[in-house]
Amino acid sequence: MDIGESARRGRGALRNPAGRFEPYQRERVDDGWDDEGEDTVLRTEVATERPRTILTRNTSPDVPFDRSINPYRGCEHGCVYCFARPSHAFLDLSPGLDFETRLTAKPDAPKLLARELSAPSYKPAPIAIGTNTDPYQPIEARLRIMRGILETLQAAQHPVTIVTKGSLIERDIDILSPMAQRGLAHAGISVTTLDRRLSRKMEPRAPAPERRLETIRRLTEAGIPVRVLVAPVIPGLTDSELDTILERAREAGAATCGYILLRLPGEVSDMFNDWLTTLNPARARKIMSQIRQMHNGRDYNSSWGTRKRGQGQLAELLARRFTLAARRLGYAPAPEPLRCDLFRPAQPEQRQLDLFA
């Protein structure tokens, strides 16, 4: 369903289409009646989810981790390009405006994590956080679920990697810094563009680009290894900034770097097309043409091994540019491996107490 312009002020998606599992589609129609008050600004709603487990297992061959945690479903940052938007359809919600305004939080995540880490069969390996939705989106300031997760991981001396756009990660430097000194923590900061105006339109509630560079600087000064992720790279729109972003992030202290090509799975394709046509109709066709050239003629190719990098001549040129820039700027090839040998599972009596908590 379309939402009035005044109602979606400060949001990324332009529409709120029904999820793909919903039996009905809805469309906004002007019936001639005065709809004064109907376009009040959309507010963020947060529901509570209480899952039985918090660790999600992964077997994808092109993903460098086998377990992750997502403290939230949906993301208030509102990035119009977010590949996680289609997951909201599983909640019978729209991947559009619902994804950024109707969120789900998992307040029991720290307790569930402690229980899973104490299981006799558990074997430690780095846990990835921020791989789907951002753990440091604005509601984390109030709910503090991510902080509880980090406190649990610190107590167990368990390794963790974090990816975020949120400057709120600086709040947890007091936990991450000592963990990093023991080889237990890496942070990744995503930077899409250095153009403040474009960022405001494309990722409306995420910190400004300069603020993210400052976050890289503050984390680095605290001894936390930082990886800058130029993600997503949008051909014809942000790809020209690749070298500059890598240079500015290196100046801020980033030790390693990476990039991910724009991914438009499911409903994201139509929403991004709508946004792009509205933002810059003169360039929209050319940008989408380049995207399709890098995804085998389609808006998105989900094949393992190519979905994050694309294929074809344009994709090869982008990869070459990235490699040369990273080498010239002195980035390390990869982050130092995190330690798993310090892991301290809960003692049997602690597991018994947790059982009856």
Image (spheres, rainbow, N blue to C red):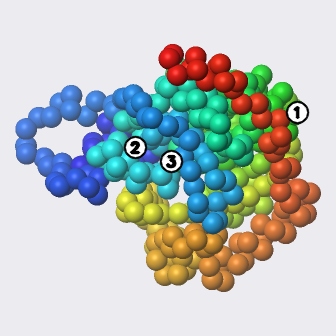
Decide: is 337 above or below 160: below
State the CA–CA distance, disc 1 to disc 2.
36 Å
Q: Residue at x 11, y 35 (%)?
A: 34
Residue 129, image x, y percentages: 62, 42
Amino acid type for the residue under numbered disc 1: Gln
Q: What amino acid does circle 3 point to? A: Cys
Left or right position of 282 against 59: left
Give the residue number, with chain letter if any, for mark 3: 79
Q: Nearer the viewer, mark 3 or mark 1?
A: 1
Estimate the x, y position of residue 309 in percent, counting from the top left.
64, 70
- From the image, tell me which residue sits under label 1: 181
Position of residue 8 relative to residue 301, above or below, is: above
Q: Is residue 310 visible?
A: yes
Instruction: Report the front residue among 268 and 121.
Output: 121
* Residue 92 placement (x, y as % from top left): 28, 46
Q: CA distance from mark 3 to mark 1?
A: 33 Å
Circle 2 — which element? Answer: helix
Q: Quadrant of residue 333?
A: bottom right
